[in-house]
Image (cartoon, grey):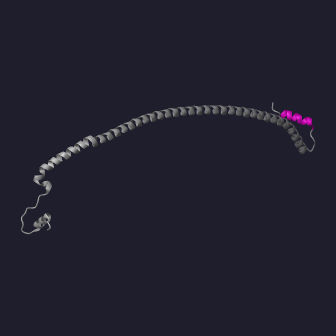
Amino acid sequence: MATPDPSAALAGAENAPGLTNPPAAFPPFDAHNFLPQIVWLAIIFGALYWLMSRVALPRVGGILEARSAKIGGDLAEATTMQEQAAAASAAYDAKLAEAKARAQGLAQETHDTLHAETEAKRHALDDELNRKLAEAEAQIADTKTRAMSNVEGIARDAAAAIVEHLTGKPVRGEAIDAAMTAVRPK
């Protein structure tokens, strides 16, 4: 014969109308289960506390210390590099200032040299122009002297031609010379 299933009997009894069995309480809230639950809570809490304090927290602490050491080392290295960069920048600025000073000195020296050369060329050109001017003035004076010496001959020829044209007779050269001597400024 088959044995009846007790859970089926309970299920049927709960669903049967007219039975007044109070419904069972939720097991964690059942007062009969408080003491075993508190014991298990203390055991599990103790085990988790031991596990965290002996295994997990030391590993996390080691990781944090390693990270702190790495960050500290990186910061020290960055500070060293920053100091080196500042020193390199100062050296660069000093060399740049020195190069600028040398360039300005060289530019001033070149300017002075070019100015001196220009002045020398200008003086040479002035001397050459003054020499050419003196030669031209001498040539003009010579040409003027020659022209003035010819003026007297031209004036004599012009006076003879005018007198001959007016009188119709040729004029003697001594008469023209005497007339010119009388008119010449003294």
In the rendered image of this protein, does residue 11 appear above or below residue 186?
Answer: below
Q: Residue furthest front?
A: 1
Q: Residue 101 location in percent, x, y?
A: 54, 32
Q: Quadrant of residue 79?
A: top left
Pick the front one: 144 or 53: 53
Classify residue 130 by image quadrant.
Answer: top right
Q: Quadrant of residue 140?
A: top right
- Report how many numbered discs are placed on residues in the image: 0
In the image, is residue 87 part of the stretch drawn in magenta? no
Q: In the rendered view, would you say 39 is above or below 10?
A: above
Residue positioned 25% across, 43% down in the render = 52
Residue in front for this viewpoint, 90 or 125: 90
User: In the image, residue 37 lies at what x, y percent?
Assistant: 15, 50
Q: Main secondary structure of the magenta part?
A: helix
> As displayed, is residue 122 above or below residue 29?
above
- Which residue occupies the extreme bottom position in the image? 17
Residue at 30% over, 41% down: 59
Is 58 displayed left or right of 108 in the figure?
A: left
Looking at the image, residue 100 sits to the left or right of residue 21; the answer is right
Image quadrant occupied by the C terminus: top right
Q: Is residue 124 left or right of residue 93?
A: right
Which residue: 77% across, 35% down?
136
Front residue of 88/96: it is 88
Spot occupied by residue 149 in the image (x, y as percentages of width and height): 85, 35
Residue at x 14%, y 65% (from the top left corner): 5
Report the span colored magenta: 172-183
- Split into 4 quadrants, where in the image is the N terminus? bottom left
Residue 81 position in % (x across, y down): 43, 36
